[in-house]
Image (cartoon, rainbow, N blue to C red):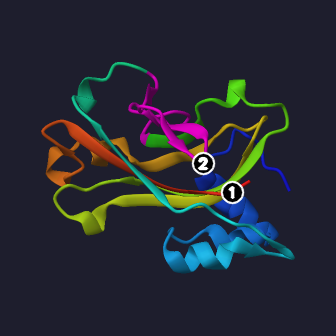
Amino acid sequence: MRLSSGLGFCHSFMIQERLQTHFILCLSQLDSASIKAASAIGNQTYEYAPAFRYTWMIDNFSSLNVKRHYSDVFTIEGLKWRLRIFPKGNRFLDQLALFLDAADAATLSNGWSRRVKFSLTVINQMNSTLSKRRGTCYEFNSRVTVWGCLSVMPLKELYDPSNGYLVNDTLIVEANVVIQKV
């Protein structure tokens, strides 16, 4: 089953749940139990590389005057990745949008594909239990090189300094990524 590349993973959860696909196994947070459970889907077993954690500190976040903002590139299993954030919202202008992006997709061979399990977290710097985490598994390929969430959290909540997400105008985003070995 393929979902439209325009859907973020928050929306795909609802569609996949209704269709009762095997992706339901991947909806939990990326802990060791969910990684093991999601590694054997149907009759296929996938081998994954060790988990990779990337922390992105975005200084002067409220001053960003761009539609989208990119992290530095990081490499996992020979592929280059980056995070993409929409500080003023994307399709839902009142929601923070956050995505994982295959940064070197244009240079990869036609037909490339990699199953990726990942979570993206906006860190609450005052109370980590209030951090906003979204996670999924998805097969990135030559047609769909970006996947994420259109509505991580309301912008009003994010930009209110008393909520703890922006401290000294710095936003911290964490990505936990596990990639299928080839």
- x, y percentage for residue 165? 24, 49
SS at mark 2 in the image:
loop
Give the mark nearer the N terminus: 2 vs 1: 2
Tag shown at residue 77 = 2
Looking at the image, residue 22 lies above or below residue 173: below
- Residue at the spot x=16%, y=59% of the render? 126
The span picked out in magenta is: 67-95
Asked which quadrant contains residue 140, the reply is: top right
Residue that numbered label 1 is attached to: 181
Amino acid type, residue under disc 2 in the picture:
Glu
Inter-mark Cα distance, 2 to 1? 7 Å
Q: Are marks 2 and 1 in contact (CB under 8 Å)?
A: yes
- Residue at the spot x=78%, y=49% of the render? 3
SS at mark 1 in the image:
loop
Amino acid type, residue under disc 1 in the picture:
Lys
Look at the image and say whether residue 75 sits in the magenta stretch.
yes
